[in-house]
Image: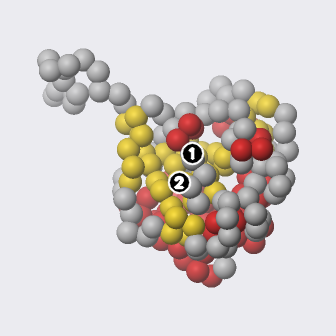
């Protein structure tokens, strides 16, 4: 688990150094702890890996003031665990479910049981995100997702993908995309 901790911290440090995390941003996390420990997705849940990753994410949250959203697995239709205040601030719709390792995933389950006032919501439009173990977070990112290429490409045995979003570029050849001073 020491390697998982170091890997997670390295990836999150690169994300913070990218300059794309802003106070109040929604940050979605998809994570297969099975993949982190070297097994196929959904086959070897690991609360230990979830705890290590969760702690690193909470540290990042304290440093950046982003709002975390933990994606559940396909058995809960990829719903998300967020703090109740996040749900209220972003006008999200709560659904009824309690994620468990076998139905929701270890990461979402761990988050649910260690957050202050956790709720489960059906969908969000996040500004940034990290996908640990190729869990497919794209459905929860805003429309124009931009992949981020970090030097650290794995947490434990799981491949890592990261993304930020940007506003759509609309208009055409006469459009101006940067404010004029």
Q: Give x and y (percent) for residue 65.
A: 54, 49
Give neighbour class at mark 2: few <14, some 14-19, many 20+ (Cα, 10 Å): many
Display colour scheme: secondary structure
Circle 2 sits in a helix, a strand or a loop, which is it?
strand
Q: Give x and y (percent) for residue 166.
A: 37, 36
Residue 158 lies left or right of residue 164; in this view the side is: right
Q: Read off the residue under disc 2.
A: 130
Task: Look at 64% across and 73% down and name the residue there.
Answer: 38
Residue 120 in the image: above or below residue 171 = below
Cα separation between marks 2 and 1: 8 Å
Task: Give the mark nearest the N terminus, 2 or 1.
Answer: 2
Q: Nearer the viewer, residue 82 or 180?
A: 82
Q: Read off the residue under disc 1.
A: 137
Residue 168 lies left or right of residue 41; in this view the side is: left
Residue 52 in the image: above or below residue 87 = below
Q: Is residue 8 at all visible to an observer of this figure? A: no
Q: Is residue 99 at all visible to an observer of this figure? A: yes
Dots 2 and 1: beta carbons under 8 Å?
yes
Q: Quadrant of the N terminus?
A: bottom right
Q: Give x and y (percent) for residue 81.
A: 72, 44
Residue 43 lies left or right of residue 66; in this view the side is: right
Task: Give the image quarter of residue 75.
Answer: top right
Task: Look at 64% across and 66% down and name the residue there.
Answer: 35
Task: Look at 38% across and 54% down and name the residue there.
Answer: 148
Task: Give the image quarter of residue 177.
Answer: top left
Q: Quadrant of the C terminus?
A: top left
Task: Look at 52% across and 64% down and name the residue there.
Answer: 159
Q: Nearer the viewer, residue 5 or 85?
A: 5
């Amino acid at each position: 688990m020491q390697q998982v901790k170091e890997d997670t911290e390295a990836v999150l440090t690169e994300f913070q150094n990218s300059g794309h995390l802003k106070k109040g941003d929604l940050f979605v996390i998809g994570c297969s702890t099975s993949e982190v420990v070297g097994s196929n997705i959904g086959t070897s849940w690991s609360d230990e890996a979830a705890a290590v990753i969760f702690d690193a994410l909470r540290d990042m949250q304290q440093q950046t003031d982003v709002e975390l959203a933990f994606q559940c697995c396909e058995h809960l239709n990829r719903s998300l665990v967020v703090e109740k205040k996040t749900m209220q601030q972003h006008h999200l719709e709560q659904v009824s479910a309690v994620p468990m390792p076998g139905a929701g995933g270890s990461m979402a389950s761990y988050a649910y049981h260690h957050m202050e006032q956790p709720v489960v919501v059906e969908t969000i439009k996040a500004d940034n995100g990290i996908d640990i173990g190729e869990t497919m977070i794209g459905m929860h990112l805003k429309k124009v997702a931009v992949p981020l290429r970090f030097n650290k490409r794995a947490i434990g045995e799981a491949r890592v993908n990261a993304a930020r979003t940007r506003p759509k570029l609309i208009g055409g050849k006469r459009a101006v995309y940067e404010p004029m001073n």
